[in-house]
Image (spheres, coloured by chain):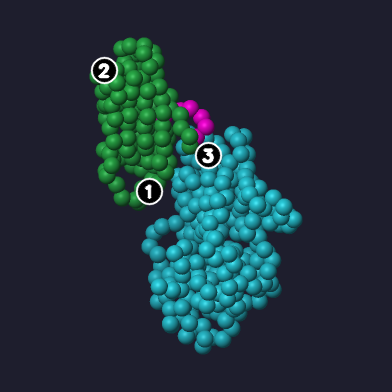
Chain colours: A cyan, B green
Amino acid sequence: MYGVTDKYGFVNEGYYLAVVIPYREQFFLTQIRKRLNRGYEVLRYGTIQYDAGAGTGIVPAASFFPSATEQWFLKYDPVQGLENVPDVSVKKDIFYHEEKRKLFHVKMRVEPEFLKHIFFYPDGQPQVSFRGQTALPSSDFGTFSGWFEFIRLPKIYQSFRTFNETNLNVRTNVTIFYAEYEHKPIADESQVLQILKKRWARIITLPLYVRDDDIDRSLEDIMEVPMFDIDLIKGERLTPGGIPRFREEVI
Amino acid sequence: MGDLINLYGEVSASGTGTLSLKSDLFTNEVTYIAIPKGFKCKIWKVDVSGAPALITALVSKDGGSSYVTLKPLTLASAGQLSEEERSRPKVVLAEIRGQTALAFGYSKTTSDTTMVAITIEICREEEDG
């Protein structure tokens, strides 16, 4: 059956994606007009491309990775076929882009799953905190393990920091599933309401809790998407427990 | 399903001790596995072959300072002994304080080599099992 999403949870052409930005108490709704490379969603990334002293992609025992102060990016290095990418930005982060009507919907799995990670969005900006304390990858809160899902907005890098609690120098492996959307934002409020009411949209709440100029610029100056008050999304349930990767629901 | 880890250790000397373990998942050789906080460790398979030996699963709840025996497996004579759980693992260690470690001890009387292959799983605390 052809529904809002495919087997990966990516939005099918013609349907809609609602992206909630918590710190703004707003969301934007956009129609997926085209999905590039449909049917080829898997990107076998391989090891994380950093060497913290134990070898490339090996997270040393009982330590931060790459270090307590550095972050790792999804660099292009291990991806066969991207050797000749001329764009330096892409070399730093394979999902970085600057296109107004493009969004990357990325799901990635970092193995082994017992490693703990925090994400930075934009790079350098941690987003998750508890009672004013920003999460570290070694914290008992605010980390994710295994799977991570995100919508990549234009002109923003994303980075990560990892912590290995075990006494093992572990080899890492990253598998990525992604959708490359070309989209058209919806500007009319009554149309937004109708789409939500008809359950034609997948709602994704990005875990962005810290106001950031780069994110605001991406939404306002580059994408120029009309933002709507969160009040328009009614009936969405909070996911109890779990890691605050994002909360989602097809309404 | 969490991370399945294949461990291998062998010992030639007679006497008692703790196995040094290797794996394709990690690059160092270790005498115990520290289980991350919020995760469980399940023992799915223990395979003992070669010279007779008593292999024991050991657990520490104080970060490796002291161990208690959880489960013995005896290879009575030279050969092979395999114990595998296909549906539910017999030993499940839940880690809540960041102090749990799993090790495997041996006791043998000959100097012939005993080889031990173990499959464990480290999965999230909230997963069933």
- x 55%, y 74%: residue: A32
Check disc 2 and report the residue beneath it: B77
Asked if both marks, 1 and 3, belong to the same chain, the answer given is no
Q: Which mark is residue A171?
A: 3
Check disc 1 and report the residue beneath it: B1
Asked if both marks, 1 and 2, belong to the same chain, the answer given is yes
Magenta residues (range): B26-32
- Report the amino acid beneath label 1: Met
Between the residue at mark 1 and the residue at mark 2, the CA separation in whole angstroms equals 35 Å
Residue toward you, A144 or A186: A186
Q: Is residue A32 left or right of residue B6?
A: right
- x 42%, y 38%: residue: B5
Q: Is residue A93 left or right of residue B35?
A: right
Q: Mark 2 Cα within 10 Å, few/some/many (few <14, many 20+)?
A: few
Residue A136 appears in the figure: no
Asked if both marks, 2 and 3, belong to the same chain, the answer given is no
Q: Chain of mark 1?
A: B
Instruction: Indicate yes or no whether the magenta region holds residue B31.
Output: yes
- x 59%, y 34%: residue: A54
Q: Is residue B51 left or right of residue A85?
A: left
Q: Position of residue A202 (x, y in %)?
A: 47, 72
Between the residue at mark 1 and the residue at mark 3, the CA separation in whole angstroms equals 18 Å
Quadrant that contains the N terminus of chain A: bottom left
- Mark 2 and mark 3 residues within 8 Å of each other at the beta carbon: no
Q: Position of residue B30 (x, y in %)?
A: 46, 28
Q: Mark 1 Cα within 10 Å, few/some/many (few <14, many 20+)?
A: few
